[in-house]
Amino acid sequence: MKSTVAMTVNGEARKVEVPPMKRLLDVLREDFHLTGAKEGCGEGECGACAVLVDGELVNSCLVPILQANGTRICTIEGVSTEGRLHPIQQCFLGEGGAQCGICTPGMILATHHLLEKHPNPTLEQIQEGLAGNLCRCTGYMRIFEAVQKAVEAQHAI
Amino acid sequence: MRSDVAAYELSAPTNLQTVLKQLAAEPGRHALIAGGTELMVALNTGRLESKELLSIQHLRELRFIRTEADAIHIGAGTTFSDIRRNEAIAAELPLMIRAASWTGSIANQNRGTIGGNICNASPAADTPPVLLAYEASVTMVSLRGERTIPYSQFHLGYKRTVLQPDEIVYSVSVPRSYGEWKQYIRKVGTRNAQAISKAAIAAVANVQANRIEEIRIGAASLADRPLRCASAEAALRGRSLEERALEDTIRAGRAALAREAKPIDDIRSTAMYRRAVAENLLEEFLRQLCS
């Protein structure tokens, strides 16, 4: 059984015909060739597959595609504009908040979501906002510093 | 092993009435999926048995928080993020906010629902001890009608509830009578974020003149279901918190809790540790009541 599912992905209207229980993560990667979202654990624990659905951070490995019908989706590919990095990305780069890069798309989107909800987050809020994103390289300190820099950058605009 | 997604059917009925009709037409045939934070994990690990699913994630009818004179009614499709953002809940039912904030990561709180959480019926879930301590009730609907029961009667055993195959949880209602009560919650897990509890206690108490007039205690990971600690409550009701009586009160509470707790050894902890931690948490609450 296949379902037709329509959604807006990074500002572009997209349509697919796939099994309705196919994971949003797999549709993004296999059908749309947007491979920024990664599969880590496949159980909603690691956040490597995190994307924004209607502005809310979700783990795309836990979303059956039918539930994404009619939604607006933002992946890491939609964060930069016209080839220019988003300030959050720039701060991760500048502070060494990315190493192997597997967790980075999820980290960036989780940061995006955090700053939408809390424009001036405390360190505790930053830690909570990123608690669902596991990194096995950086030890998190540089990531937290990158987020703090992103907060400053945001206010400088 | 991951499941073959093509073997599963999923549809998204446009309203609750249609869901109820489908459930009534063939009870037990369909499984309901809301935020997917449990069922999709089962799918990804090849453990999702139901091959036909109905999505209720989009049903606005199930996603509400209504504050009425005597209770706050929370629709089954309300997410943990919705709960955390609600001012009335934050002001009056702070334990709900704490438990919601412990339920997985932000991404999972954005998807996971309170209805899904109690229907999943894990004895380790974070919100059930709070619902037990607050004496919440659960409303279920089917084509046959509606019924409301105390939440303490909802769970029948490990992953078993009173919910019938043609029924759906509609809402959870929490009384608004705890303004003057002392409230407590603490969870012990491996780490702060995203850990499943080794043991957790939520409790509320009405203390008058250093005497426990009323106390209600809910616990996670101490039995095959979320546990209302009725024996500990009975042992503590009417007890004094005066300095000369406090140690006796604590001993009585600990002993009663130890008797009714039936924890197990599993990958997360041992029965002995869980029982000891639960007793310590209860003691911590009782000592806080004096201050």
Image (tube, grey):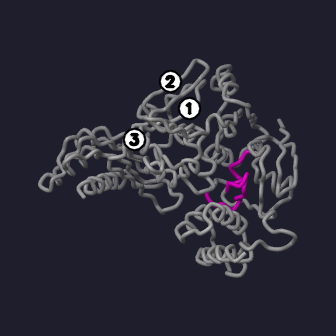
* Rendered residue at 66%/58% (across/down): A41
Q: Is residue B228 above or below residue A122?
A: above
**Residue shown at the point (61%, 35%) measured from the top left:** B62
Q: Is residue B215 visible?
A: yes
- B161 is higher (above) or lower (below) than A93: above
Q: Is residue A137 visible?
A: no
Residue nearer the viewer, A62 or A77: A77
- Residue at mark 3 to residue at mark 1: CA–CA distance: 18 Å
Query: What type is the residue that disc 3 sits on?
Result: Tyr
- The residue marked by circle 2 belongs to what chain? B
- Give percent across and percent down for residue A40: 68, 61
Q: Earlier in the sequence, mark 3 or mark 1?
A: 3
Q: Separation of disc 3 and disc 2 at Cα?
A: 19 Å
Image position, residue B18 (x, y; %)? 70, 25
Q: Assess whether residue A143 is covered by the magenta stretch.
A: no
Mark closer to the observer (3, 1): 3
Q: Which residue is mark 3?
A: B134
Question: For residue B49, what is the image quadrant?
Answer: top right
**Alpha carbon separation for disc pair 1 and 2:** 10 Å
Apparent side of residue B242 relative to residue B148 in the rendered image (left or right): left
SS of the residue at dot 1?
strand
| Residue wearing tag 1 | B169
User: Disc 1 residue type?
Assistant: Val
Q: Which residue is mark 2?
A: B147
Q: Residue at x 84, y 68 (%)?
A: A81
Residues drawn in magenta? A45-64
Q: Residue at x 59, y 69 (%)?
A: A120
Say few, some or many: other residues with alpha carbon within 10 Å of mark 1 (under 14 / 14 to 19 / 20 or more).
many
Instruction: Classify mark 2: residues with Cα within 10 Å, few (<14), some (14-19) or many (20+).
Output: few
**Type of amino acid at the residue the image marks with label 2:** Arg
Under circle 3, the secondary element is loop
